[in-house]
Amino acid sequence: MTEAATTSLKKSALLGVGALGVVFGDIGTSPLYTFKTVLDMTGGNTPATILGVISLLIWTLIIITSVKYAGFAMRIDNDGEGGILALMALLGVKRRKRPLIVAAGLFGAALIYGDGAITPAISVLSALEGLHIAAPSLQHYVLPLTVLILLALFAFQPMGTARIGRLFGPIMALWFLTMAVLGVWGIAKHPGILWALNPYYAFHYLLNGGSGGFLVLGGVFLCVTGAEALYADMGHFGAGPIKLAWSTLVFPSLVLNYAGQGAIVLAGAPIEGNIFYRLCPATLTLPLIVLSTVATIIASQSIITGAFSMTRQAIQLGWMPRLKVSQTSEEGYGQIYVGAVNWLLMLVTIALALGFGKSDNLAGAYGIAVSATMLMTTALLFIAMREIWRWPMPACVAVAGAFFVVDASFFASNMVKLLEGGYVPLLLAALVYLVMYIWHRGVVAVAARSGEDPMPVDVFLDELTRAGVVRVPGTAVFLTRAKAITPPVMQWYVKHSKSLHKRVLAVTLEIASTPWVAPRNRLSMAEIGPNFWSITASFGFMERPDMPALMTQIATHGCPIQPNELTYFVGMEKIVAREDGRGIPRWIRVLYAMLLRNCARVTDYLKIPAYQVVDIGRQISI
């Protein structure tokens, strides 16, 4: 092996260890509750049932995680980024009106917030429920301890996770190795469980289990909650390291542990309580509970961080109100904190833990959101196969159709749990989707209204001379959605102040459908009138615009400005109803106005120094 290949392999291995703490936390802690949930649903522990269930778990991991996500989805990236929003942007929704793709992508993203609220609750609860076996006298403290851990987890978020994040990977590596060892210990007690590797037992159980066999799929699906993270976090670690970690450690550990749980049940272990902890010798149960709790905290942290990252993507793509996004570390762009999302998730997560009380009860609410997201991803994958890979229609139908049948089966089985708590993630997703829809409708309506009756720049400059408008020293920067025409905010300002700076920059910020834009492709600028510059700056949906840095770049491209001496004019919009009756529905207008009043100031979002800003209030009827 060459030195370059060795270095590359070492780098992939290190990134793979890092991915263990971010990508695989959710799916890696599912053995804590999945098998016991399925057994509760089957109502029996006959050899045929156990072999069928374990076979279903193993082959679900193979089909959904190894084949669908690692084998297909991760081959479709948006400039290295993955996830349902990145895939939606890749399919060109910013260039073409494709409402069905937009709806699928946004609702799939909204469903992830539901998953983000349930994962910490069910994971921490299931870990602490080991106290029922290790120390029965402490079982009444499981729920209070869960709430305390969740409170601490969310309270810690503003501090960032850069420092302790380095420990996440090694701790999760220890967790997966522990699960593998426990699994081997269990298999040794009844090696016959290895027959479950044969998919015949999975099909036999489904075909002969009647309606009960179908309903069990809702519990089986819990073993792949978190599989979406392989695709969503691809931009942080790269496809290679994630696949390496999955195939060499995570997947074997999961298979061994599920097989071990099945083996001890076949060997006669009781199925009451948490079967996962029955794999462990009694003297080591308490240390295992501690390790399990730490692993579930790491899994929860990964989900919360993912929600922050997806929120930023949605804001950049124009589908979410501006929220205050804080960078918690200079080491990584993904180390961010979004306060509004953090505290709302905390309230919902703790409410779920208190409301459902046990991980078994929460399992009824879990799965619907994830299976629905996977359905949306499959629909977008089908379009990507046609438009990006240029596959023939029969091949697209065969591959995506097979995934769709699997995903639809799991979704239908999970929908049976709708009234048992499954409505919770759907309700949360519906609320998030509603916010996205209202915000986007409002932004589009304001842009359309502001662009009515555009005034060409040459006409505007002639009017300035004719009206005797005073030109004062300095440079004014007007943020505008309209390119190559006079910014409406500028017209409003001149109308009321009867003056204008000698040099004017009309700046339009555009968000590209790619996650990153190279600095050399950032700017498009032209002097379209005497001392009147039209500038378009492009940013990726994973980038946050920084106006002072942008002005410095503009100065180096030939525009004669001093970045520290600029005056930024920003419109403060008050939304009112149109008088001609052609506006958007009243309920959308009212809610959009409320969101606009409560979102972060555009100057804060763009990092514009407050002492260089002039706010211009104006009414816009939509």
Image: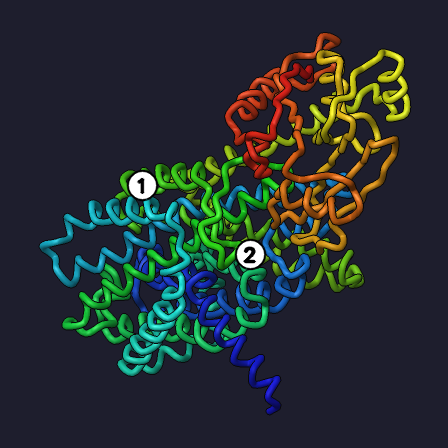
Image coords of residue 8 (percent x, y): 58, 79
Q: Is residue 540 left or right of residue 179?
A: right
Image coords of residue 201 (percent x, y): 45, 72
Q: Is residue 273 visible?
A: yes
Mark 2 secondary-structure assignment: helix
Q: Residue at x 40, y 44 (%)?
A: 117
Figure check: 327 above or below 76: above
Q: Residues within 10 Å of mark 1 (few under 14, many from 20)?
A: many
What amino acid type is highlighted by mark number 1? Ile
Image coords of residue 325 (percent x, y): 50, 42
Figure check: 88 above or below 354: below
**Of the numbered discs in the image, which one, if any, rests on residue 2?**
none
Quarter containing the N terminus: bottom right
Quarter containing the C terminus: top right
Mark 1 secondary-structure assignment: helix
Image coords of residue 601 (percent x, y): 55, 30
What amino acid type is highlighted by mark number 2? Ala
Counting residues from the start of the chain, the first of labels 1 and 2 encountered is 2
Occupied quadrant, residue 299: bottom left
Q: Which residue is mark 1?
A: 350
Q: Which residue is mark 2?
A: 232
Q: Residue at x 55, y 31 (%)?
A: 610
Q: Residue at x 85, y 11 (%)?
A: 467
The residue sitting at the front extreme is: 473
Q: Is residue 193 left or right of residue 317?
A: left
Figure check: 122 above or below 603: below
